Image (cartoon, rainbow, N blue to C red):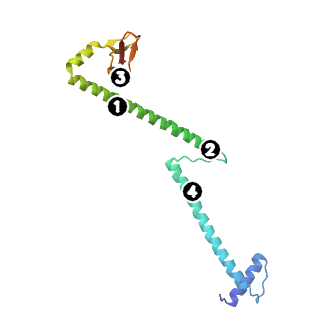
Amino acid sequence: MKWCKEEKLKFIKEMEINYGVRYSENDEIVPLYHYLHHNGKQLDSQLTVAKDLINQLEIRVQEIKKQTGTTVYNFSNGEAWKWQWGRAVVALVIGWWIFMLGYIWVTYRESESKLTNAKEILAKYPIGGEQLMQRIKLAGEGYYYLEFRKQKGSTIKDFEEYIELQNNGVVRVPLGTK
């Protein structure tokens, strides 16, 4: 890098006035110092501009947060785990509710399906259905049931739930509550 004698003298005076450093005019390292000094000033000005832009961005982000109502969480060291546990508990509670609603829906659909099947059977065999309807009884506890005499074969095994009454050969099949 070639530079004229006036620039060299100006730089030497500037260094002496601003920083108290004296260089001779014939010093070989003065051009290197000049280059480093001016590049440092240029980088400083670029850094200042970058800091100003970052500050402006932060101000703009704060304004946007105020407009949108976004919640800001500021945690000290060691406090974030409490927040994470809280979020996990909330997720578990929501998951539990979703599971329970799904379970209720599946149970409802299953019972509706069984009711539809029962109606189809009654529609297909109207005489047998009328006979069954006449045999339905109401227990004192408030539930409906059918009683059959127990057969020697395996005819009762098709029922999901039944009660065998005290060795007298009668089987009670509960149908539901009143």
Rounded to the nearest whole Å, what is the CA distance between mark 3 and mark 4? 76 Å
Is 114 rendered above or below residue 1?
Answer: above
Nearer the observer, disc 3 or disc 4? 3
Q: Residue at x 21, y 24 (%)?
A: 123
Badge 3: how crowded within 10 Å, few (<14), some, or many (20+)? few
Kindly state the secondary structure of the residue where label 4 is placed. Answer: helix
Marks 1 and 4, how far apart at CA: 55 Å
Which numbered circle lies on residue 109?
Answer: 1
Labels 1 and 4 touching (C-beta < 8 A)? no
Residue plotted at (48% across, 35% down) = 96
At mark 2, the secondary structure is helix
| SS class, disc 1 | helix
Query: Where in the figure is residue 74, as x and y percent of width and height?
Result: 62, 48
Amino acid residing under circle 2: Trp
N-term-proximal mark, 3 vs 4? 4
Residue 140 percent location from the top left of the image: 39, 9
The residue labelled by disc 3 is 157
- Badge 1: residue crowd in 10 Å (few <14, some 14–19, many ≥20): few
Quadrant housing residue 83: top right
Figure check: 20 above or below 121 = below
- Residue identified by numbered label 4: 59
- The picture places residue 48, in percent across and down from the top left corner, at 63, 67
Give 47 or 151, whichever is nearer the viewer.
151
Q: Is residue 154 visible?
A: yes
Name the image quarter holding the C terminus: top left
Of badges 1 and 3, nearer the viewer stands 3
> Sequence-wise, which precedes: disc 4 or disc 2?
4
> How far, Cα to Cα, is label 1 from label 3?
24 Å
Query: Which residue was labeled with disc 2?
Result: 81
